[in-house]
Image: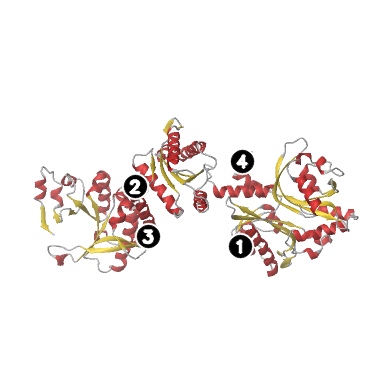
Amino acid sequence: MSHITEAEYKNIFHSSPNPYVLFTPDLIVADINEAHLQLTDTRREDVIGKYLFDAFPTPQQEIADLLQSSFDRVKKFKVEDTIHLLRYPIRYSNKDGKGWKDRYWIVKNKPILNQDGCVVFILNNPTEVTHLISSGDIDPSWINNSDFMRNANIVREISKVENEHRKMRALMEQAPGFVSILRGPDFVFELANKAYYQLIGHRDILGKPVREALPEIEGQGYFELLEQVYRTGEPYIGRAKRIHMQQEPDSDLAELYLDFIYQPIFEDDGSVSGIFVQGHDVTDAHNLSRKLSYQASHDSLTGLFNRREFELRVENAIKEMLVIPNVLSLLFLDLDHFKNINDVCGHRAGDEFLRMISMVLSSRLRATDTLARLGGDEFGLLLKGCPEHVAMNIAQDLRQAVSEVEFVWQNRRFSGSVSIGVFSFNDISITITDALSVADAACFLAKEKGRNRVQVNRKEDDELINRRQEIDWIRDLTEALKGNTIELYCQKIQALEHPAKYPNRYEILIRLKNNDGDMIPPMAFIPAAERYGLMPAIDRYVIEKTFLHIATTFKDHTSLLSISVNLSGASLNDDTFPEFIRNIINVTGIDPTQICFEITETTAVANLAKTSNIIRDLRKLGFRFALDDFGSGMSSFEYLKHLPIDYLKSTAHLSVKFNLISLMQPLSMPLSVLQTLCISKR
């Protein structure tokens, strides 16, 4: 059976003649179709995103309580609930004024579950029966009775008026859903309404036993259910039961889903003489529910499970180990050089490549394995009952399969490559966060060691321990950046000569506060920030906080103020960094001449030309620059010819002040440079 697209499901929902509202578990209107809008004379923009009783107010609390109770039962028991007759007035407004008009409804509330059995939406389907109340065909005592079973009153009434065929036929024709009456142990059709005829393709059924009238149903369990109800006198309620039947002559069997009840018809002596059948075709609602559940747990691009579903399954697998000891293996897969495909060929090509890789990976796995796309070019794989050596073999097989992929897009050819981290464990005390972190660290190490390889994670592996610690730092730093909890400190810079001439010189330093309130020095977490690309964010955080502090605290005392701020190489390679600086100047209004940016020699020479250009751009604004760790390389003096800097900070514990013009002259020997420097020990 082919899959129905999301667009087709939306079309089914919005074009259905049956009125539907889709609620969240909190009873917020998520969607509503045109049939419902017309039925209630409502505008979409007036109800979407609103709470049930704000979107559809009622003047009486007891009515709201009844409807609320129905929704509560749906959420608690995760089964459909039906209110067979509900008085729910609708507000009107016309030339004669405003008010409430009594309307009567049969209301069905159906839970939409995800694959874990959790209610993610509730599908509300009201059917108006105001005209039946007006004509007297429905007893008002049934109003607001929500229990499907308690509505056996309907069947008893039908039994009592069995001789009044005309009235009963009228009642059946007006009843919501399909209705039929079967008589005797052979279940001969005595009556059926138009909805029932539409369901079965307008076949000639009256006077025929059900097995003769509907032969294609044989073997699907429905005849056996009729016999059970007839024998026991106990009704049977079916919820979204699947049935295959013909809806057109000589047509293929259609797959339908039905809500129905088989209710025994009793004689005066208590014997069962027949069965009353009533129900609804809920195929549209069932398919919509299944589609929504699928979307909640699957990646829309590849069709694989998504990160949320993957983590749920890993968590459940860990919980299962409490009952049944087992070995789990987690594999993290990261495609190598995937960015090249996106950059060269565009995202359409990248999406197609991801779909191809997903099919290759899926073809190598068991039906019981859980493969998910975690995001971007990252995949996760959960293997149950799989020890480390088996997981390693599977990982190598997947790596080889990906390496054999050849992807061609507009005459450009790309080869597949993947780095895989493996973590196997049977420790029931491990948390899902730790398990995922360990597998991720192994994958990162596989990429770091050259890519296109498999890296197993063992507790005794020092490299992986370091990577896991770095990942912990990244988590802490990310939270600190979001929560503005990175602490800034200033360290006074003391002049060795004429200290009174430079009274207010400081260097800005950062610290990270841990959960115990202790301050962590930067060298503990900066390497991790550099490795995982967080330095640009940290630089901007420090600059923004420092500039704002200067603007507010030293607004009238900046004449002798000089603040040094450290910059990373990542910021110096960021083309947007100068524009960020210009914007922060405009916001704070600080004087750029009061700021000195410090860069390390290693950072500066990594991309000398680009670094020089950014330094020149910022110096034009008034900023000054200092070169830190000067003398750490053999070519330190040579680099000075290319870097327009103002100060040096020596690695040899020296404070250096120099004539910039003399350094720009051709250098023949390091001695000629040293002769221009005034050096004194700190």
For marks 4 and 3 on the same chain, the one whose residue lies earlier in the sequence = 4
Closer to the eye: label 4 or 2: 2
Q: Amino acid at mark 3?
A: Ala
Which quadrant of the view contains residue 68? bottom right
Callout 2 environment at 10 Å: few (<14), some (14 to 19), or many (20+)?
few
SS assignment at label 2: loop
Q: Secondary structure at mark 4?
A: loop
The residue carrying mark 1 is: 51
Q: CA distance from mark 4 to mark 3?
A: 45 Å
Left or right, 578 with respect to 496, comes to right
The residues bearing labels 3 and 2 have C-alpha atoms spaced at a distance of 29 Å
Q: Given this view, does label 1 or label 3 mark the residue nearer the observer?
A: 3
Specify the amino acid type for callout 4: His
- Which circle, 2 or 1, is nearer the viewer? 2
Q: Amino acid at mark 2?
A: Asp
Q: Disc 1 to disc 3, how far (Cα)? A: 36 Å
Residue linked to disc 3: 480
Find disc 4 in the rendering and name its residue: 3
Q: Position of residue 105 (x, y in %)?
A: 74, 60
